[in-house]
Amino acid sequence: MSLDLATTRRIAKLARIGLEDAELEATRQKLNDILGWIDQLAEVDVEGVPPMVGTETEALRQRADKVTDGNCRDALLACAPETSGPFYTVPKVVE
Amino acid sequence: MLSRLTLTQARAGLSARKFSARELATAHLDAITRLNPALNAYITTLPAQDVLAAADAADARYAAGNPGLMDGLPIGIKDLFCTKGVRTTAASKILADFVPPYESTVTANLLREGAVFLGKTNLDEFAMGSANMSSAFGPATNPWQKASDPSVALVPGGSSGGSSAAVAAGLALAATGTDTGGSIRQPAAYCGIVGLKPTYGRCSRWGVIAYASSLDQAGPMTRSVADAGLMLQAMAGFDERDSTSSNRPVPAFHEAVGKSVKGLRVGIPAEYRAPGLPAEIQAMWDQGIAWLKDAGCEVVDVSLPHTRYGLTSYYIIAPAECSSNLARYDGIRFGTRVDAPSLDGVYEASRAAGFGPEVRNRILMGTYVLSAGYYDAYYLKAQKVRTLIRRDFEQAFENVDVLLTPTAPSAAFAQGENMNDPVQMYLNDIFTVPASLAGVPALSVPVGLDGAGLPLGLQVIGRHFDEETVLSIGGALEAAAGFTHLPAVHAGAGA
């Protein structure tokens, strides 16, 4: 499958990575080269084969529904590039 | 000669009070000051007073007669492990100023056992690479040089390239690494040291910055096979904060080294005899087979028929998981922020400025293979192929105890080589990726030098949670190879 510029732009939008037009074309070419190579997977017969979603050596566990962490608001906020009081800040979203 | 010791030797010297942890730490701080500007193995070094304070505490525990497994041993920590109060960058601009308020489980385990941290080692950005060239803090350089042309700077491998360079050059007795598709084993082979990727689930992933969560696994990078066992014992163990952490008991892995390997069955996978495999690598592999036969192993030909689809399925699965994991870097809660008038604009500008080209491309590839209309053709298909690859290993391990292969298809290459062709770069992982996909443990042991004087490694792959047999075989290879070469750049040189 070959990737066109519109699809590349759509992927970049989905991934929230802002690319200039010149970068989009270079990216399209790089991804296309990799996709061309990946297409060899088409020749593998996977009829009836279940997908492997993890390494499946351990069964998922359950634990008691209890709070085990928290009360570290200031430590976490200290990692943020911009804060206002006890809040993260973002550009205005609701008009 | 404190910078040439193995962990095991250093521990014995500390126990016998032949030298102090403070002397050991001082020797390493001095080596880092002298050599790190050229090697760029560390992104961040810890303040000397902190390192010495940790060493003094270790000395006190030796004096009291109750040292931990890693007590007083100075090591490097790959800058992918979150360390409380110490900047953790993942070699990315987007985390250039990130100081975690918590400690990863693996580094907490090492601290509990008394290890002395020297600093945070360089890597490919977010562990995505095989050459350490994608680090936002500049490449780490391999301390080994070609005999014929010492002026050419070589890559230390990747992604754990700073760790392998530091251990090889005497800037740490050992270091932590992480391995998603070969990122411990390939740099270990390129730098002439030992690297062990444990079974998926052995070491907690909690606090390790995520790349591809179904593949990421932490492990030791050391100067001997016994050291790898010792350090893994300190790193491993059940952690309820990692849902894929194993609650199996953690054995004293190093005791497996030196055990007789007589009668063990060693499989040689036919598919790893790739066309174009350099004659020197083939010869080293044949030599390894001969050594194991001499040690009493039975060598058996086996087939892993889906090997050739390992790399391609990896380069769908790993980017898919990466695109999801790296969605958290939004410029709002931590990391670098680039302002824009809208919220989407902040995301787009922060992520464009913060991620390097290789990381961006993998996020975009992952987004593509997960997107509507392509999910089944790419992602689901790759997951099914992954099942076939795991079955290949399971079937092989019905007949053999371990597999023996080369670790990488070449020795270390020059910085800047393979940069324009991503597929060529990805081929470095051809022998390491299948074990990652299957989740089985795999070890790289340095066994010799090629014609240019560069180290080559052999890989031992074992059954799930059977690191001990892998280490026994690795120990036999190590004993037979007697690899004692040192790189051109080394802290002990001339001393």
Image (cartoon, helix red, strand yellow):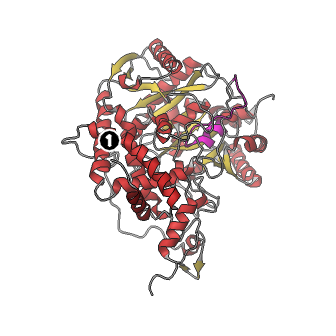
Query: Can you identify the residue that label 1 sits on?
Result: B386
Q: Is residue B311 above or below residue A14?
A: above
Residue B166 colored magenta?
yes
Question: Is the residue marked by circle 1 packed among few (<14), some (14-19), or many (20+) residues within 10 Å?
Answer: many
- Residue shown at 50% from the left, 60% from the top: A21
Q: Is residue B165 above or below residue B446?
A: below
Q: Quadrant of the C terminus of chain A?
A: bottom left
Q: Is residue B240 visible?
A: no
Residue B115 percent across, percent down from the top left: 63, 46
For residue A51, side relative to residue B40 (left or right): left
- Magenta: predominant secondary structure element? loop
Residue B265 percent across, percent down from the top left: 37, 20
- Residue shown at 52% from the left, 32% from the top: B254
Q: Residue furthest left?
A: A48
Q: Chain of mark 1?
A: B
Q: Residue furthest bottom?
A: A95
